[in-house]
Structures are given as C-alpha cells and as structure tokens.
Image: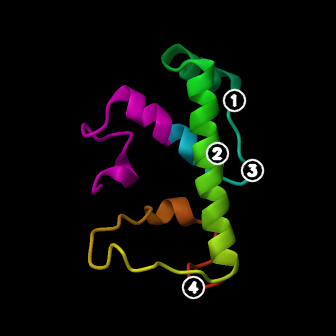
Amino acid sequence: MRDLARFEQSAAFSLTERLVLRLAVALTRTPASVDDAFFAELRREFSEPQLVELASAIAWENHRARFNRTFGIGSEGFSEGDFCPMPESSSLAGEASPSHR
C-alpha cells in the first residue's frame, strides 16, 4: 500500500498489476481516456471478458466515490487507524481540495 502512489517504479507490483493500476488511473481521470496503444497492451495480458470485468469494477468504484463525495458521505470507520495511502500531490493538481464538494 505504501508504494501505491509510485506503482510504476515500485518492485512491489507485477507487470499485470501495473497494467490494472494504469487502467484505473486512465479511467478515473477527467476526461477518461484509453488510447489504442494502451488498449493493445491490455489485450496482450487480458482476455475480453477480463477487460470488461476490470473496466466495470473500476467504473463502479469511481461512480461510488464521486457519488459519496457529492453528498458528503464519509467512512463507516471500519478501518479506523489503518494505513490509507493518499495520492501524490501532483496527481491532484487542478482538483478541488478534499474538503470541498
């Protein structure tokens, strides 16, 4: 978890895991974008059903996060005190601070 913000450079993640994380980043940006070259790279590693499942899971979690943020829905406290990695500040450039909805 501590290497999540630096997953591209971290030895903690396999090539497959880095591809999934790249897809998550690509699909949660605004605007979401997956170019042809990246899609071809994904197709070499994943079948079409696997890609559908990955994209669906990423889109659903992105939907939930944005929905919860809109209505100020916070944590249930199940992981109180546990480690939670924050995105690197460069990935938040241009976004409103977390306290703003």
How far across and how far down the image is residue 42, in percent? 55, 23
The residue located at (62%, 83%) in the rendering is 72
Q: Which residues are magenta?
A: 1-21
Q: Secondary structure at mark 4?
A: loop
Q: Secondary structure at mark 1?
A: loop
Q: Secondary structure at mark 2?
A: helix
Callout 3: few (<14), some (14-19), or many (20+) C-alpha neighbours within 10 Å?
few
Callout 2: few (<14), some (14-19), or many (20+) C-alpha neighbours within 10 Å?
some
Q: Is residue 29 above or below residue 74?
A: above
Q: Which residue is mark 3?
A: 31
How far across and how far down the image is residue 11, in percent? 25, 36
Q: Is residue 16 magenta?
A: yes
Q: Which residue is mark 4?
A: 99
Q: Which residue is mark 1?
A: 35
Q: Which residue is mark 2?
A: 27
Q: How is the image coloured?
A: rainbow
Kind of residue at disc 1: Asp
Q: Is residue 48 above or below residue 85?
A: above
Pick the residue in front: 27 or 82: 82
Residue 81 appears left or right of 76: left
